[in-house]
Image: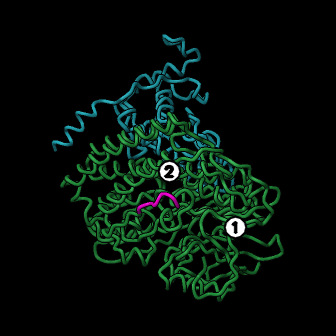
Amino acid sequence: MRIAGLPLHYVAIGSAFPAARARVTPAQWQEAARLVHEAGQRLVALWGADERDRGAGFSVYAAYATKDGLVVTELALPAEDPRYADLSGLFPAANRMQRALFDLLGVRAEGADDERPWLRHAAWPADTFPLRRDFDAAAIRDNPQEQYPFVRVEGDGVHEIPVGPIHAGIIEPGHFRFSVVGEKVLRLEERLGYTHKGIDKRFESFAIADGHRLAGRVSGDSTVAYAWAYAQAAEAACGVAPPARACWLRALFLERERVANHLGDLGALGNDAALGFAMAQFSRLKEDWLRLNGDIFGHRFLMDAIVPGGAARDLDATQAERMVRQVQSIEAEVLAMHDIYDEHAGLQDRFLTTGRVTSDLARRLGLAGLAGRASGQAFDLRADFPAKPYDELEVRKVTLPGGDVAARAQARFEEIAESLRLIGAILLRLPAGEIATALPVPAPGAFGAGWVEGWRGEVLVALEAGEGGMIRRCHAHDPSWQNWPIIEHAVMGNIVPDFPLINKSFNLSYSGVDC
Amino acid sequence: MIPILLKILKTGIVSEPAPLPDEALHTGAARIQADILARLGRALAIRQVDAGSCNGCELEIHALNNPYYNIEGQGIKFVASPRHADMLLVTGPVSKHMERALRIAYEATPEPKLVVAVGDCGCTGGVFGESYASCGRVANVIPVDVAVPGCPPTPYAIMQAILTAIDAKSMAKEPPMDADGRR
């Protein structure tokens, strides 16, 4: 794993997938971004850390997915007036990550044309930064609400519809500002950050062996993906590998999480297109699915089932048999529902061409994960860089050209089928043995990374060890960072009543990006 | 149309009986008079407010609407505005950024303004605790009648908490026992 055309001193990150990191100079920082962009590869995440307690300044990190693995570039910044070169010109998704990084750490992206606050609303003032080590996390700061400068659309008959932060359903909070003419959406601007809980700062008070509990609650619907990515990062930092059986169990949990979410989304998509029958059926199937999780593993969403060093939950032969039977019955029911969806003219009329993101736009903006695959972006970590046990399972990557709500629904149907196949294969081949190994205390400064294809897309966790087995810095990245800005493009020219349907077809996490 | 009808027929009715109220879930703040609750009966409108949760609790609140729990069959429905609501169902540690919105929603809710705090975070702040970004438990921001722990609590537990909040009998100091000797 290296950036082709840029000689750097790479240090392997002992991870479950090919990964390396390299220190770069300011010139190399820009060159790395340019080369990755030119090669059609992607920016995964951007974060930073305060190193002033070590006699240095700040660090900023950019993680790229290259042809043969993950590359993390690390740039040292001075303590006074820390700045790094803007990446959003090449990777539009960097815009919000850079603004969040400034809000949290006070390091500025030089040359960025959007410097509005992103995560900071009123919880702390503009001149203090939560991720600096001299920031007292317990102190409450009451800062006045500031006016956020939304972009205004001018013209005859243009009006604004402000929505949120509290939405008219059972859904996470965020603010949407629509500029519309009649029913047609000219522009949507999102304002998120409402569920900012200070997770990155909170990690600093957790032991490495315990941090999976917090990581598993960055975005509850992806708890398995986060816990696994965190465990990979912790294991890389500690220099251990989980036992084989634990790896297979983790994949079992991850595929069960994928199926659960896809079932829920397919029901909600039907419901948003006024087919209540679909919601009743899919929510019933999802409940059956979750109940079996609860019966066998003790938790409906498998929270805390993955721990650093292995797995905390196991199943026996009888339970495996029960799961095989469930897979068979769900498979038949989903197939029947798929036929009903395909044949339902009213549903297809709402789905087709709605909220379209063309392959070209998806590539330029970096649409990730499931939504990316439904717009022709053929990336799936399980197939591209298969960690154990995916290296033995040959995951079939679902890629569709459509890019509309219909394609995102179809991708879910196909991914359910593939996940059910994977679950069957895992249950058949689950190796015997221990499910966890002891986690040694890593040396301070030890670095690890985790990278997992969750149901929504790729989750990245980067971790640096502190003194005495504590976390010095941990950053968790949700694929929603990439995809939220693209919803703004997907709704353009659509009618306002189709927004819920389009939004649901992406089903992005608010908590995952607000952190 | 025929496949849909056949599917409905074949599925049948899967709804399960609702849980009994559990007075232990009351926070002790007996603000609402029993006679008002008796009048309210079980025709309840709920406004759900995510005040900063990880979205885990939302998954289980969604599940209340599935055919197994069939919460609308209990006369309970989720509404789009706090002005239409008898109850706020609040999840999350209340983030600093949602504190104001939650207060506004509470003020907009007409009496009896019942509040059920959902999940470990709603009850105590959970793994997120209290910090520069988190106000911690819901009761730190608005009065709470019933709190249901769990990460996340099961749909059954959430339904029980909702039914407890509107059960006039469970407000009394010595609730009557049911046939199994349960209070």
Of all chains, the one bearing label 1 is A
- At 63% across and 74% down in the image, what residue appears? A72
Q: Which chain is cyan?
A: B
* Residue B135 place in picture, x, y as percent: 64, 49
Residue A46 lies in the magenta-colored region: no
Residue A16 image-quadrant placement: bottom right
Q: Colour of chain A?
A: green
- Mark 1 to mark 2 CA distance (whole Å): 29 Å
| Quarter of the figure that contains the N terminus of chain A | bottom right
Which of these two is toward me, A143 or A414? A414
Residue that label 2 marks: A221
Q: Check disc 2 and report its element: helix, strand or loop.
A: helix
Which of these two is toward me, A172 or A286? A286
User: In the figure, is residue B90 to the left or right of A207?
Assistant: left
Q: Amino acid at mark 2?
A: Asp
Q: Check disc 1 and report its element: helix, strand or loop.
A: loop
Residue that label 1 marks: A129
Q: Is residue B167 above or below residue A10?
A: above
Q: Is residue B35 above or below residue B73?
A: above
User: In the figure, is residue A356 to the left or right of A134?
Assistant: left
- At 34% across and 45% down in the image, what residue appears? A331
Which of these two is toward me, A158 or A502? A502
State which region is magenta: A391-396
User: In the figure, is residue A368 to the left or right of A281?
Assistant: right
